[in-house]
Image: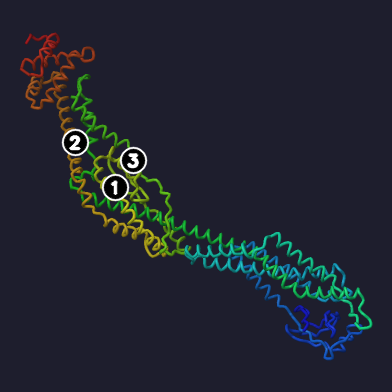
Amino acid sequence: MDSIVISRKQAATPFKQRITVRTVDGEKLVGTFTLPAGLRNGKRIRLSKDRLEERIAGDHKWPDDGIMIRIRVLNWRLRNGIVALFAVAGLIGGAALYSGLLILLWGVIGFCARHNRLHAADRFDPAKRRFWLQFRNTVASTATLYLTAIGAVVALYLTVAMVFTFVEGTLTVAQLVGAQQALSAMSKFYEKWIKLKEGPMLLALAGVWLLTCLLLARRPHGPRHPKTAAAPLPAGYRAAQALNRIAGFYSRYSGPVAVTLAVLASFTFLTNVSSTLGTQLRLKAVTSTEDYRFAARRIEAHLAGEVVSQLYAQIKSAMPPSYQQAVTTANPVPGQAAATRRQADQLVASLAQTSPADERRLAGAENSANGAQNVPEESVIDAPRGNDPVAMPQDVALTVDQAATARNHAESDKSDDRTEIINDSGREVLLQTEKVASEPAWASLKDLVGSRFPLAAPMVDALSEACDKHLQETLREKVPALVKQFADKTADIRTTIKAAAKNIAATVDVARLAGKYTTVAANLVAGRQDTLAYLTGLESRLQSRNHLVQGILDGFVFDDNINQVLQLSDHDLQTGVVDDLRATMLAPGSIDETQRHNAAVAIHTLGSRGLRTITRQDINAALPLCGCHGG
């Protein structure tokens, strides 16, 4: 049964339509018929024999009951709506370029379909059977075949892109990688077995298209010549019949062949589409992995800082009470050393000096104090960032959205992960490291503490020994579960990390580690106390020394001062007073002559009263200055 395609506008009113009908002999002819209004898709109408003979001139053999024609009214509104949905799907899926391509293809298909509807009968109408008209009709019909197949593949891609957009956030990294590998395998399969090279495919399509155009444009459509035994068919007519059979055979199979070639050509596009989707999946997987790594690294750094802080506090608590008090109070030695130095600089005699032993101990205390003061007010020991990638465990099935949430959660935590190691005399030393077992960080910290803040060295040594690789592995095992909690937004970062750090710190035998360094800590405290006591005593001696010498040189209560010197039980102080007097007496030109005279009198008096520190040489030097009688 033959069919004709009409538009919805035509079906609304009576209209004239050129229709191709087939005679009993199989010859196709074209006639113009008036069709009634109200035709619907699928409706059948019968063209009677009388009507056929009336509308088509010539002696033709028609069926007695006429010819049945099926009406096709295409619903372009529905088709346009479906294509629009595919285009919107592409926009949602981030494939706007392919959405535009689908709309362009659909526009060309619609134009070709309209041309085919209006000129469907031209092939069989002798009045229209000119080569270029037939050629144009053939171009429109073959374009519809090819573009429909390619458009279907484009629509498939747009649908997949939209579905991927909706589900990508719920896919885990493993699922993303699996889908990417499946698409990669599909692409390789197309590339190896189905996809044709662009050059051969273009030639094949051009060949099919050109052959279709030539055969259908040149196909003979004249009346059949009667064949009798006495009158054989003319050669030209036999040639025309042969060409007609070839064209008929080709027209029957050219459609499937064209569709097959178009689908194969579409696989070239589909291969690229699969590769594109695979690339997108791979990028999503990489992004999600990087989000996890970032979150895991930040959480590990937070956890490491909290573990170090808690262990340091526990080690400090396990140390002797005297040590705890010493490390929690400001170091008094630098201040005492400065006070003692000021007192030493106030010695009366310009040439007087402290004893070598006192000078060595005072200089040592000053160097220690200066070393601490040369440290910046805030020193941060920061370990180099590790380059080892944080692998996502197989048992942590994070989706794309969860990985992004974990990263945002980790970025939002602005808390300080640094551990305060030293806070002494306005100098603060902080430790910040991504890993507890960071050898460069501990080496730098030990070097700084050992040279500038030696009292804290036992705690730092114990802490570095606690933070070994085993503790680091224990800490890292906690990270994936923490990332998962933060991805699910089921926990507060700081509270959760503190609780996890407490559990990790509980695995360390703090008492054993602190016990190893208890003796060293006690010795350091005793050494500090001894140094402080020595400097305090030295300051007192220097103060008394200055007081006595100044009183003697000024001549005030001379006898009382001489008696105090003779009664001194502190031999070092007594020796220092004599050294000051001797230096004053032997320094002509730079000291007031009255003070030199008083110093000489004091030397002579102390010598005459039996002070053994005064030598015969001192007395001989004093006699010319004091005018005293020889002793």
| Residue receiving disc 3 | 377
The correct choice, above or below, for 77 with respect to 513 in the image is below
SS class of the residue under badge 2? Answer: helix
Q: Residue at the location (18% across, 16% down)?
A: 584
The label on residue 464 is 1
> Are discs 3 and 1 less than 8 Å apart at CB?
no
Give amino acid for label 3. Answer: Glu
Q: Position of residue 190 (x, y in %)?
A: 61, 64
Dot 2, how many residues are within 10 Å of its Cα: few (below 14), some (14-19), or many (20+)? Answer: many
| Residue receiving disc 2 | 532
> Are discs 3 and 2 less than 8 Å apart at CB?
no
Q: Position of residue 403 (x, y in %)?
A: 45, 61
Q: Position of residue 433 (x, y in %)?
A: 36, 49
Label 1, label 2: how far apart the Cα atoms are? 29 Å
Q: Earlier in the sequence, mark 3 or mark 1?
A: 3
Give amino acid for label 2. Answer: Leu
SS class of the residue under badge 3? Answer: loop
The label on residue 180 is none
Frontmost residue, 214 versus 590: 214
